[in-house]
Amino acid sequence: MSKGIYSAPRGTKDTLPEESALWHHIEALFRKVAETFGYKEIRTPTFEEAGLFTRSIGEDTDIVNKEMYIFQDRGGRTLALRPEGTASVVRAYIEHGLYVTQPFSKFYYIASLFRYERPQAGRFREHHQMGVEAVGSKSPYLDAEVIYLAYHFLDLVGIKEKELYLNSVGCPICRPSYIEKLREFLLPRKQELCEDCRRRLEVNPLRVLDCKKESCKAVTEEAPPIYTFLCDDCASHFAKLKELLGELGVSFELAPNLVRGLDYYTKTAFEIVSRKLGAQNSVCGGGRYDGLVEQLGGPPTPAVGMGIGLERILLSLGEDVPQIGQGLDVFLAFQEERLRDRAFILLRELRGKGIKADMDYQGKSLKSQLRQANRLQARHTLILKSDGSAVLRDMREGSQREISLEEAIKELIK
RNA sequence: GUGGGCGUGGCCUAGCGGCUAAGGCAUCAGGCUGUGGACCUGAAGAGCGCGGGUUCGAGUCCCGUCGCCCACCCCA
């Protein structure tokens, strides 16, 4: 094929200008919502020491086991492209001593994440997430805020058909006893579980709940739901969260098997799913991670957060995407080549006044210049004529009139 | 990592083994209007992902390979 030597790496995508405008629109909306809710932007490196992720996400997760882009740099450091957003934010929170200067901090981020997966609908090797992390409070009001923020944003962006799945995965006090109960329940049914789950049963029984295999699901459906084993603290936290969501008018469904692929979650775990997506139907995921800051070397600090997948938003929007206008204010056309210099100088003046302006650089005929103006969605075309006069043409109306340059500029500014 | 589907000009698609691979969109030029969008005319653009095989003959069949897509898995 005559398509060049290289193509974008597997699982990555180019975002061409037209679509890029849509991304801007969505990101701007997210920024606005997050800031309205009191979150401030944080930017962290695209890669980190690999240990940060193995430690936080968990050794026995797929993300760490087989999906991380991990490499040695020339200095022999073991680094990884970030596979998720939370660990870096927590690392930065600790590294900059924010637990002293700003112990309660609310962050948002827009970042690209990397996982070595087999691409399919809604799944890429590089994808983008918009997320928030509220670090430093154990209040269930914050869980509700984070969930509501996601929900509200998805509403605004145009995703109406969605469902919130909610669970509580307990804490270090109650989870161990639940895990014991779960193991007791699963052990006699070991034969019915898949190979992976038999192993999980030993290493990380909670993960069995997350298995999507029909045979395993059949078993785990019968399993005692975790929230019947929550300690008082977790139970009241969960109850309060449900109550708050009710007051906020956010409906949800309890999902006792929702464990999520990251081990750091405590108490709240949730996912928002879009009806319009295929197999990868989750647009948003998040939860509470009260132990993570301490685990990464900071003081005991509760926190809650979530992430929204940009590509999945685009997918579930489908054809219902807003048309973002990015047309020119004016296209500068000229009748003869010898007028190019005048046009070029005028172009600078227009642009200096903040008018979006452009002209031909290919030596095209006037006819072609107008075609181009049309294609660039120019609101006006200013035509410099050979006799020194100028004509301002309204491209929507199709009307035009002779005009002095001073008048034209005035006209274009408004 | 496993399974399935598909790879024809920039994009979409036709082509049931056989004339110089067809059409639509887009592109470019021209015509109609001094000067765009509609319409008309014309032009340029692929040798059918890549490699091998079967055959007198392959875009069409077979094998391999790469890529894309979908699903499992996992997740945003």
Image (tube, rainbow, N blue to C red):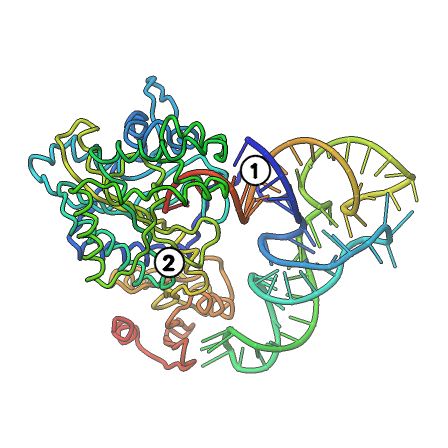
For the residue pair B75 and B65, the one nearer the viewer reads as B75
Name the residue at 45% across, 43% down: A217
Residue at (21% x, 28% y) in the render: A296
Type of amino acid at the residue the image marks with label 2:
Leu
Is residue A151 left or right of A338 when viewed as pictured? left
Q: Position of residue A229 (x, y in %)?
A: 25, 41
Q: Residue at x 36, y 19 (%)?
A: A74
Give the image quarter of residue B14: bottom right
Label 1: few (<14), some or many (≥20) within 10 Å? few
Which residue appears farthest toward the top when viewing the image?
Answer: A76
User: Which label is found at residue A5?
Assistant: 1
Residue at the disc numbered 2: A22
Residue A333 position (above or below residue A183): below
Q: Position of residue A270 (x, y in %)?
A: 30, 48
- Is any atom of residue A287 visible in this view? yes
| Chain label for disc 1 | A
How dense is the environment of label 2, judged by Cα within 10 Å: few (below 14), some, or many (20 and up)?
some
Say which label, 2 or 1, has the lower sequence index: 1
Under tag 2, what secondary structure? helix
